Amino acid sequence: MAARRLAELLADGVRGQRVLVRADLNVPLRDGAIRDDTRIRASLPTLRRLADAGARVIVASHLGRPGGQRRPELSLRPLAPRLAELLERGVSFCEDCVGEPARAAVAELGPGGLLLLENLRFHAGEEENDPDFCRALAALADAYVNDAFGTAHRAHASTEGVARLLARVAAGDLLASELQHLRAVLEPARPLLVVLGGAKVSDKLGVLHALAPRADALAIGGAMAYTFLASRGEPVGASRVEPERLEDARRVMRSAEQAGHRLLLPEDHRVAERLAADAPSRVVRAIPEGWLGVDIGPATARRYAEEARRARTVFWNGPMGVFEMEPFAAGTRALARALAESRGTTVVGGGDSLAAVNQLGLGPRMTHLSTGGGASLEFIQGLALPGVAALER
Ligand code: ADP
Ligand code: MG
């Protein structure tokens, strides 16, 4: 079974129909101003196609973590004028996403019209997937389109529950494109190289266990590398180590070995006296007492880059070092360049990893930038995403 496509919904006809679109408009705001509208722009194609087809388009999203309470600073209201400007169409706003105000606002909507609803997470029922809240959302619409890949791994009311209540459903263009590109990692052209880094082993445990036996090579960087090195009894100085994950690290290494695949750990490191951009730092093979690893070293960066050049599929999640600090960004930068130059399929996921790639202006040179950190990690493990499963008919 596959998720229904937007094209199928459009072919069936949506003129005059109320279509609820779950978008991901979770943009960074500061003092009510939109700091980055990437997610709004990414949502436009689906909205435009529906409006052009004469649907009455109802847009819903979450923003931040209001925890089931009305928090004015997390209102979606400032997004309505931006959406209108980008779509070159009128977009009305309703101060609630369910109930009488929402019903009235939907009733006002003509064919091709757009309405933005207030933050879904102002209601506790959203994240609880509460049946009454699901019904209240479903009552607004005749059809449902999910275009929010970033929350597709959550069974929330607007991502899962509501889809089960409406007969006509589809995956939006953004969601469909994510699934298509991530499938290239799930069923890869080999060799498949997976590069994992970032802050913690515990954040990426699932993907480590799932991909160690599947990836032809699994290269580890970032802070999680020190937990792996420590689990092999190597010196890690004052680097960040997760003592409760040492056994997991050993299991991941064993399962790669049993599958006959390679697990690569850093062979040199940039170490610093403290975690500060102006701290003294140097490149070492073995981490000295009292120093902390802040980046993969140049020899490791060359080796990982070489792997990336040889691979036909590369998936990368998690920076190789504390890239936010310029002196510790070299490893992450080298890897991003290697992926940009790779002739294989390159998929990058994770908020910080995308920030690093975009800072270098290398975004357009990757095959795909995945917008959903957690969702993309779950998908490439082969897990079913509740928000996608609910679209299968
Ligand atoms: P992503 O958002 O791409 O999934 P993560 O959130 O897992 O990535 O990790 C990113 C964070 O990991 C960054 O803030 C970075 O500074 C941190 N990090 C990377 N390497 C180290 C290290 N050696 N020591 C401490 N923090 C690190
Ligand atoms: Mg992050």
Image (cartoon, rainbow, N blue to C red):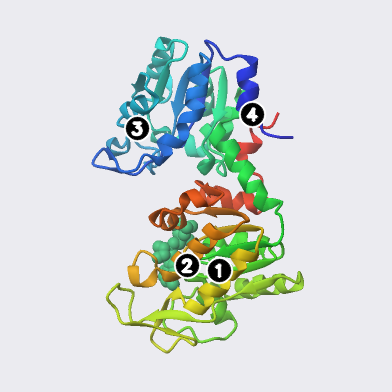
Asked if labels 1 and 2 touch by Cβ distance under 8 angstroms, the answer is yes
**Coordinates of residue 281 in the picture (x, y in percent):** 35, 81
Indicate which label's residue lies in the foreground, 2 or 4: 2
Indicate which label's residue lies in the foreground, 3 or 1: 1
The residue carrying mark 1 is 305
- Dot 2 or dot 1: first in sequence order is 1
The residue carrying mark 3 is 76
**Mark 2 to mark 4: distance in Å?**
38 Å
- Dot 4 or dot 3: first in sequence order is 4
**Mark 4 to mark 3: distance in Å?**
27 Å
Q: Amino acid at mark 2?
A: Ala
- Dot 2 or dot 4: first in sequence order is 4
Q: Amino acid at mark 3?
A: Leu
Q: Residues within 10 Å of mark 4 (few under 14, many from 20)?
A: some
**Coordinates of residue 324 in the picture (x, y in percent):** 35, 64
Secondary structure at numbered mark 1: helix
**Residue beneath the point at 64% across and 29% down:** 5
